[in-house]
Each structure stands twice: as C-alpha cells, then as structure tokens.
Image (cartoon, rainbow, N blue to C red):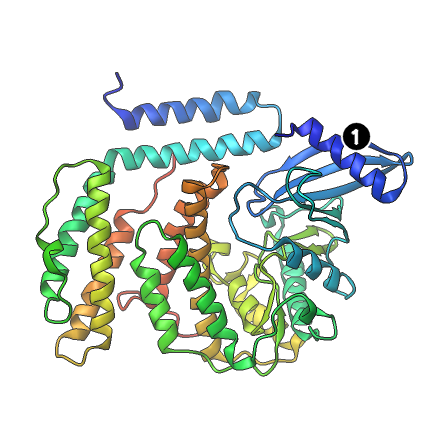
Amino acid sequence: MIPYTDDALRMLSQRLMQQTVPELPSAYSQSDALLIGMLMNAIADEVAHGIDRRCKDIEQLKLLLTKGAIYYEAGEIVDRELLNLSLSEVNLLRDQLIRALEALHTCVEQSDLPGADVLSVEIWQYYEDMVARHRITAAG
Amino acid sequence: MLTHAELGLKIAEYLAGKWQQPVLLIHLEKIFGGASRETYRIELKVSGEPRSVIVRRDPATSLIDTERELEYRAYEAVCATDIPVPEPLFLENDPHVLERPFSVMQAVNGCETDAGILNAEQKQQIGSQKYELLGRLVNKDPIALGFHRFMTVPELNHCAERELDYWEHVIDTDEIHPQPIVRAAVRWLRRNMPTPPTKLAIVHGDFRTGNFLFKPASGIKAVLDWEMCHLGDPLEDLAWSFDPLWNWGEPGYAGRLITHDKAIALWEKSSGLKVNLQAFRWWRIFAAVKGIAIWISSSEDFKNGQSKDSILAMAGWLMTDRQNQILLDYLSPHSSHQLSGITQ
C-alpha cells in the first residue's frame, strides 16, 4: 500500500534519475530516462494537487458563466454538481465548463452591451489564475 | 520490429546497393529529441573509407504531422544555394526496407546544437550569422529554386490566413482538453489580420536555435529540420525565432544569442526588407498559437499513438503550459508585458 502516492512517485523518480540512469548503456536511453524521471515529478505534483486545482477552476468557471448569462446562456451545465472526486469526473465537468466559457468569451467580444469589456477582463483574469494554478512543478 | 543492430545492418546493405560499393557498419546511435522522425547517426566504412550519414525514419507516431517527401525536396532545393544544409542522399518511400519510409543525409561532423555552451563573444558571432542567414533565405526566389514543383504557392494576401487556418485545424482535430487561451488568441488573430507581405518567401517553419549545427569557433554549418517548410510571409520565421519559448529565462535575446534589435537590424540588412511592426506583432502572436497547436498535437500522439515517447509527453504538457504563459503575456489586459512593439 502506498498511501502517499505523490511521495512514492517522487522517490521512484529520484531512484530512476540518480541510480538507474548512470547504468543505462546509451546516451539516448539516459536522456529518455531522465526526461521520464522529470515527468514523474510533475505527475507527483498533479497527484497531490490536481483535483483541488480543477475544483477551484470549476468554482471560478461557474461564477463567470452565471455572471455572463446575459451574453451567453450556458444552460444546465452551470448547475451541475460533481458526482464524485475521481479525476475523470472532475475533468469532464471542467472541460464542459471551459467549452462554455470559450463560447461566452466569444459572445462577450462581439457584444455592444454595457459591461462586456469588464467581463472580458474578468475572463482574462480567470485564464491568468488557471495558468498560475496549473503551472508545472517538475523539480525533484 | 527491427532491433538497432538489424536496423544498422539493413541500412548498410541498402547503401551498398545504392552506391555499388562495399559498406561496413561501424556504429549506429539513435539521437535523442528527434520527435518528428526517428533520427540515427551511422558510422560506416565505404570501400574502406570512413563515412557518416544521418538516417531519419518515419516514426510510428510524430510530434509534427509532416510530409517526408516535402522535407526531402526542400533539402534538395536549398542544398543548391548558399544556405548550408546537410546534403540529401536518398529518399526511400518503400516501407519494406526499414519497416517505415526513411531518408539518408550526409552527416555534418564535429558540430553542436546547444547554444548553452557558447561564450558571450561566440553567441554574438553565431547569433549574427543566424539572422544574416535567415535574411538570405528570405531573399531566395522559391520559384527559381523549384519549390512550386512540390509545394503550394499561396497568394500573397492569403499567406497569413492559410497558416492560421492550417494550425487552427490542427487544434480542432487534436485537442484533448479545451484550450481557451489559444482559442482567444485565434479570435484575436482573425480580428487583426496583417497586411500582406511584399514578396513570397521560403519559410523554414522551425527556424530557431537548436535547429542548426554550429562549431563554436567557426559558426553555423547546417540548418536542419525543414519538415514544416512552406512558402509564405518573410516575417513568419523571424517571429517564430523570437518566441520566448526559445529564450526561456533570457527575455529580449533572440534564441539566447543576440538582442531582438540586433537580430532585426541584421535580418533587414540581409533581406533588404523592412519589418512592418504591426504585421510582425501578428506573426509573433501567431507563432505562439502555432506552438500550442504543435504541443496539442504531441499530447494527442502521446495519448492515442503507439510510441509513448517521453518527448511527446513533455512537449504536450510542459510546452503547452509555457506557451499559455507566453500568450497571456502577449494578450491579457492584466499583463505588464503586452506585446505592443517588436523588441519585447
């Protein structure tokens, strides 16, 4: 049993990069294994924080879509609740909400209604928050 | 599936047939990072004389969906000019020889690709040569070199739209998760189409530090990786070479070599063209969109393709992350570095 999966991945990555890589016979396989080790560290970070990051995205996305209902009606997706906290379920809802946000942003950009510019700035703020939240940490 | 040893022997046998001389395999090494093709460096003895070749074999999956024929013909056409490229030797489309089609090039020996090894003076020298070379490439007449025989010749006023359509289609086709930032960037590009170029140029398509071979003391010896070559706007390669992805951590330095101002001045002098600032801004934002399209494509290849190459995973994840940061820097109203000029 590995209760702390992220730590286990980091330790295995460290072992791969420090002990296995020097034993590999070709420069190609050494470079490949080093990159795999680096990716394992990034995946460890995702294992630890990925669901939380996506849930924060979902919360922010729902707020924006509710606020933007006069420009684009996203429908029932805004009220949909997560059935569970599995990665596939969280990804599914997040992806659906982001697609709705893309449609909202397009409508906002084309709108002459008052407040459209302000909402566009808020959507860009969401993009900034999203990128900052999901920034990859691959250091060992 | 062929083992490395079998692959080497089959290549030696193939070349012996082509050259009608005895060919002995000395060493075969797979080169890391060739994500669009499997790349092998092969040391041979041909009638007793040492010779090195590079073999690029179609992968089971690829970072860039490219046409090997087009790339090979581009090498052939450019090889006849003063732009240094490895000499193309053979293009083999028969998949039975090495299980997949491949091409063979003359190796360029004793060279480097990593600019990180250069001292400040060498960076100036090689950076200057890089942009002088790009200006010279822009100056070539693609029709006189026969490019129209193997690639589409776009109308001048369709160059930008054509490229944007192509890469948006890649995003549409390969996107696994929605990418709202690049979609916003595509909409921005469509609302702000650039003025057409004054001339049609050969666009390398991936002209950046890392895609040329150099010797630190004597400069650039070969420009590589022409798989995204096409005809288009002369500003496209210049903008791509300025993408912050290629100078991460060293903003303002084109490909970590020379300042943007100096690169533009050298390019303008060599090409005889002036950089249209508005159009150049468009092409820089386009470059980031094209980058994301490539990284999205590599994610799709990693998820659904056969190879599971670590490069594909890295490109699809880390590069998308960075390229999103770049687009935010260019377009977000919250950014303090919005791309208003050409030298940022």
Q: Quadrant of the C terminus of chain B?
A: bottom left
Relative to residue B156, is residue B85 depicted above or below?
Answer: above
Q: Where is residue B144 in the image (x, y as percent from the top left)?
A: 74, 75
Q: From the viewer's perspective, is B306 left or right of A75?
A: right
Circle 1 packing at 10 Å, graded few (<14), some (14-19), many (20+), is some
Left or right: residue B224 versus residue B88 is: left
Of B146 and B241, nearer the camera is B146
Where does the image place residue B196, in percent across and percent down from the top left?
Answer: 51, 81
Q: Is mark 1 on a helix, strand or loop?
A: strand
> Where's residue B55, x and y in %?
70, 43
Q: Dividing the image into 4 quarters, which one contains the N terminus of chain B?
A: top right
Kind of residue at badge 1: Ile
Closer-to-camera residue (A84/A138): A84
Instruction: Indicate the chain on which mark 1 is placed.
Output: B
Question: Does residue B210 sit above or below B202 in this rendering?
Answer: above
Whether residue B41 is visible to the viewer of this picture, yes or no, is yes
- Place of residue B171 in the rendered image (x, y in percent of width and height, measured from the top left): 40, 58
| Residue pointed to by mark 1 | B26
- Which image quadrant for residue A44? top left
Q: Residue at x 36, y 37 (%)?
A: A42
Between B45 and B332, the one lying in front of the other is B45
Comparing B66 with A17, the one in front is B66
